Image: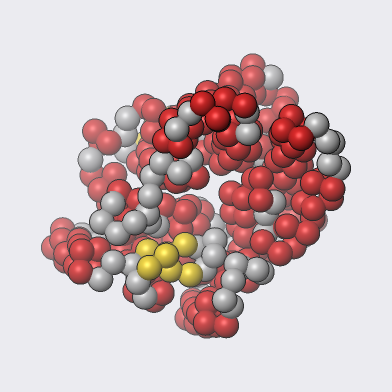
Amino acid sequence: MTMISKSGSNRNISLDAIAGLFITIMMFQHFNIVTRAPLTIGHLFMYNTVWFFFKSGMFHKPTNLNRYILAKWGRHLMVPFLLCSLFGGLISMLCELNVTGDLKLDLLYGIAGQIAVFGAPWWNIPLWFLLTLFFVKLITSRYDGGYTWIYITVSVVISCSHYLCSESTRFNYIGNTALATLFYVLGYKSREWKVTSNLMYWILAIVFLVIFIFYPAAIDIWANRPLYGFYILAVFAAFIGILLVNKLFEVCEFLHVKPLVFLGQNAMLFLVFHVPLYLAFCSLPVRGRLSETALNWCGAGFSICCCFLIYLFLERHKQFRWLIGG
């Protein structure tokens, strides 16, 4: 189930494959190709973003906050967050220049306001994940498995309160940080769970399918609200789904296909670049000659190809990997 990475450390290929599947689903949702409507693939894996917080918790190590730790987390999370926020702003400014002929610097100024209100700039909205994960790591820095009920209770109260009291996506990082903390803690605790009976997984699968078919519910963790169905049921279904998909990929080695593993091992790169590149393509004059479906697929192809070219550049010039937290 593991392989030796380039750095010489053991790496869990099953988790890489899941990450590759989920980053692919995430991208194609942003490309307006995969929908999360009930009884679709997007609905089946509606926890694709939540899973990344759960997975991060699986590798959590208790630590005392100090200058070194803050610098480390800042380098891995906040540096790509800030630089790629600026990248999205620059792309939006160039696209506006191409469309209107006006160089609107206020598009760059607006980045700070968008981050303050929504947790990320509109032209690179997936970056909210990095900011929220940074907050989660600060909150759980000293968590060592003790007082878990406090972390879970506070997380649930804050996330539910935000959902009930907020009618918009403004300041949604309050709710999504609480919900992300819940799954992060559950990911850490999952290392202690020893489920040896396959019967338990069959029971979980039946429960998940009953919810999936008869009581559809899907969570949008960025907005901290359900896309449809009941909020608590959507969170519960996401948790069961994560347990099932982790077990499925652990047992079924044939799912560890190289493209998924590659995408999973480079998920950060695809996360931080795919939306601005897609939006840039959609702003080109060619959009008037394409149907909406063709535009989405061509934009997806353009974005993914550009991300791959960036990967090749960073592989050739590893001194620049710090740009994406490497």
Instruction: State left or right for residue 196 relative to residue 271.
Output: left
Q: Is residue 2 above or below residue 36?
A: above
Q: Is residue 83 visible?
A: no
Q: Quadrant of the C terminus?
A: top right
Horizontal and vertical percent for residue 153? Answer: 50, 82
The one of 167 and 138 positioned closer to us in this rendering: 167
Q: Residue at x 48, y 40 (%)?
A: 31
Depth order, front residue of 147/115: 115
Farthest front residue in view: 288
The residue lying toward the viewer, choosing from 125 and 178, is: 125
Q: Is residue 90 above or below residue 190?
A: above
Find residue 250 and report its image quarter.
top left
Q: Measured along the vertical axis of the image, is residue 158 above or below residue 69?
A: below
> Where does residue 295 sit, x and y in percent of width and height?
48, 32
Query: Residue at point 48% right, 70% down?
Result: 225
Residue 270 on image: x %, y %: 55, 36
Residue furthest to the top in view is 316
Q: How many tags in the picture?
A: 0
Here the colouring is: secondary structure
Query: For the point 65% across and 68% down, which residue is it?
Result: 170
In the depicted structure, whether residue 82 falls above or below residue 316:
below
Counting from the top left corner in percent of width and height, residue 290 is at: 48, 28
Horizontal side of residue 127 vs 243, given as left or right = right
Image quarter of the N terminus:
top left
Q: Is residue 187 visible?
A: yes
Residue 311 left/right relative to 17: right
The residue that appears at 73% across and 57% down in the rendered structure is: 114
